Amino acid sequence: MIAHRSRQRGQELVEYAITLPLFLLLVMGILDMGRATYYYSAIHNSAREGARYGIIHPEDVTGIETVVLTKAVGLDPAFLTVTTVLPDEGTIRVTVTFQFRPITPIVGALLGSNEVTLGSQATMRIEG
């Protein structure tokens, strides 16, 4: 009876050792998705705020970039790209892209790269 109990405890340890890495991978993947969602939301909001500044000051490209970088809270400016275009008379388009790097290594293996480009754009009518 004692030998039977020690074998069962060994079996539980093996099951735990097999399932723990899968559980941690699942948790890290969920955290990466949460980070990506937050970064996309920050990019979307900063593009919209840059376009709002641009409808009043369409020639001030440096000011638009400054507003976008200021509103992109939590994002590394080194991985952020801001493009301002006047596609036609009376409108302005601000495009913001960010190079997202997931923490979980298997996400990079599944995507074929360790970076994912997140982007958003906002187009508004120029006032006045």
Image (cartoon, rainbow, N blue to C red):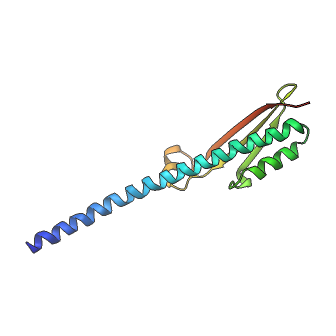
Position in image of residue 81 (x %, y %): 75, 46
The residue sitting at 72% across, 49% down in the picture is 80
Q: Determine whether, in the image, residue 123 is placed left or right of residue 29.
A: right
Residue 124 image offset from top left, x and y in percent: 79, 31
* Residue most extreme to the left: 1
Which residue in the rendered view is the most extreme toward the top? 89
Q: Residue visible at 58% across and 52% down?
A: 35
Image-based side of 103 in relation to 23, left or right: right
Pick whichever, 42 or 3, lies toward us.
42
Quadrant of the image for the C terminus? top right
**From the viewer's perspective, is 60 left or right of 47?**
right
Query: Which picture quadrant has residue 86?
Result: top right
Q: Position of residue 53 (x, y in %)?
A: 84, 41
Does residue 103 sit above or below 122 in this rendering?
Answer: below
Residue situated in front as seen by the camera: 44 or 109: 44
Picture quadrant of residue 7: bottom left
Q: In the rendered view of the protein, which quadrant contains the N terminus?
A: bottom left
